[in-house]
Image (cartoon, grey):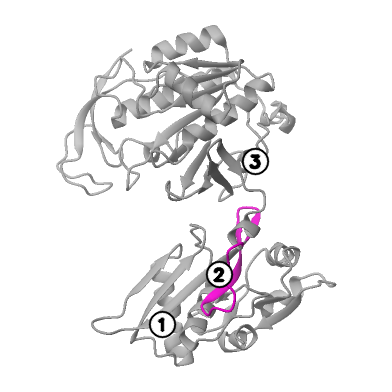
Amino acid sequence: MKTSTIYVCQSCGYQSSKWLGRCPECEKWNSLVEETDSPVLALSGEISLLNAVDADEAIRITTGIDEFDRILGGGIVPGSVTLIGGDPGIGKSTLLLQVCDRLSVSGKKVLYVSGEESAKQAKLRANRLGTASKELYILNQTNVELIKEHIDKLKPDILVVDSVQVVYSSQITSAPGSVSQVRHCAGFLNVVAKNNEIALFLIGHVTKDGSIAGPRVLEHLVDTVLYFEGDRFTSFRILRSIKNRFGSTNEIAIFEMLITGLSAVENPSLMLLSQRPKNISGSVVVASVEGTRPLLVEIQALTSPVNFGYPSRRSTGIDSNKMSLLIAVLEKRLGFNLSNFDVFTNVVGGLKITEPAVDLGVVAAIASSFKEKIVCPDCVVIGEVGLGAEVRRVNQIQIRVNEAEKLGFKKCVLPKANLKELKAGAKIELAGAGDIQEALGFILK
């Protein structure tokens, strides 16, 4: 194979034929290093009519872990490549070891390539998790060419590489974990998986900014990207779908970390609201939608007088710019004097919510804390807030209301524009609001 010398940015993966002092992509100085690039294997295939290609949805492989199957779009597609990223120690290897155990027990031939642990160390961890299947193959190897030789001999249905940062190719002169090595090895394994109809899972560790020699430079190479969110020192983990060619994006799965591994949380709304305080101001339940799943989430707010200096604005799980905008709407349109108050907001459970449908809930939580008025405990709040204090319609309103009704909520405050979209006969009381002032009249006691 012919090789060529290129210069690769160690921060974002930008390539250049000549050295540059500053990367034109991420604008970081002295981040381009000289590396030898080498072509990978080529995909095998012939020209055919798209209509003649056999692509039956029934070929998906189910793992037996419903949450994992759902986030993949209904199961594993043979020949697909899935990247699972997240902070070290958050549960990536644990989850995939459990998935491999289920698949091997069901009769699938599974090869787990462990580059970070020896076979004995992996066996000890499998014993602790109760996943030491007699049918699961393990390989302790980091050279990608040797890994391919074992793949050709075993011909597995499922291949897991843990992790992509430690595997290397002898055709690349740079060290394992560099941008060139990671990209080359991922591309090499991608072609092997496609040509042999092997479902490939790559584990990738993410640094604080998620930008160096890791999952960020691989997202365009793979079919599905899943990211673990949450604090590794807490018990709950959120697996979020960022990219999926075979299913819905922005889907999430919630797991709880136990001694025996990750356990799927079947009713996350109930779990997230299980410790909601009663008769306390600043607590509001909102209906959010992640992918195809409706979630009822508690949003908390706390306002406190400023003793000195400038007021603080801090949020956890909600974009700080969005919170500042909603505070400005309360001050300008409703006359709330929040300039002398610290404002803190929090999404309970470690979730991060970006959709605008929770705007009204954030506003209600801040107003509740500021006025020391309790929000109706059986009330769910839905709605986007505009700069004119109007409450604007949101999408997928029916499944949000259905989720609130299923969990026993008695009242739902939502945009007036959404009322005509709901089916008649709902057991939950529907209160349509045209602006924030009207909505707060429904929400606050």
Per the image, label 3 sits on a secondary structure element best described as: loop
Q: Looking at the image, tell me whether mark 2 or mark 3 is earlier in sequence order.
A: 3
At 46% from the left edge and 20% from the top edge, which residue is drawn?
Answer: 113
Which mark sits nearer the N-terminus, 2 or 1? 1
State whether residue 171 is above or below residue 404: above
- Does residue 440 sit above or below 234 in this rendering? below
* Residue 270 visible in this rendered orientation of the protein: yes
Q: Residue furthest right?
A: 425
Q: Is residue 278 magenta?
A: yes
Q: Which residues are magenta?
A: 274-295
Which kind of residue does numbered mark 3 sit on?
A: Gly
**Which residue is located at x 62 percent, y 48 percent?**
265
Q: Is residue 181 magenta?
A: no
Question: Which of labels 2 and 3 is toward the front?
Answer: 2
Q: Are marks 2 and 3 in contact (CB under 8 Å)?
A: no
Residue 73 bears which disc, if any? 3
Relative placement, left or right, of 410 versus 386 is right
Q: Please tell me which residue lies in front, 81 or 296.
A: 296
282 left or right, relative to 410:
left
Amino acid at the residue labelled 2: Val
The Cα atoms of the two marked residues, 1 and 3, are separated by 40 Å
Classify mark 3: residues with Cα within 10 Å, few (<14), some (14-19) or many (20+): some
Q: Secondary structure at mark 2?
A: helix
> Which numbered disc, 1 or 3, marks the residue that appears first in the sequence?
3
* Pointers 1 and 3 in contact (C-beta within 8 Å): no
Across and down, in percent, residue 44 comes to: 54, 17
In the picture of the structure, the residue carrying the numbered disc 2 is 358
Amino acid type at image mark 1: Ala
Would you name the residue on which mark 1 appears? 328
Tell me the quarter of the image containing the C terminus.
bottom right
Residue 46 in sight from this viewpoint: no
Q: Residue furthest bottom?
A: 335
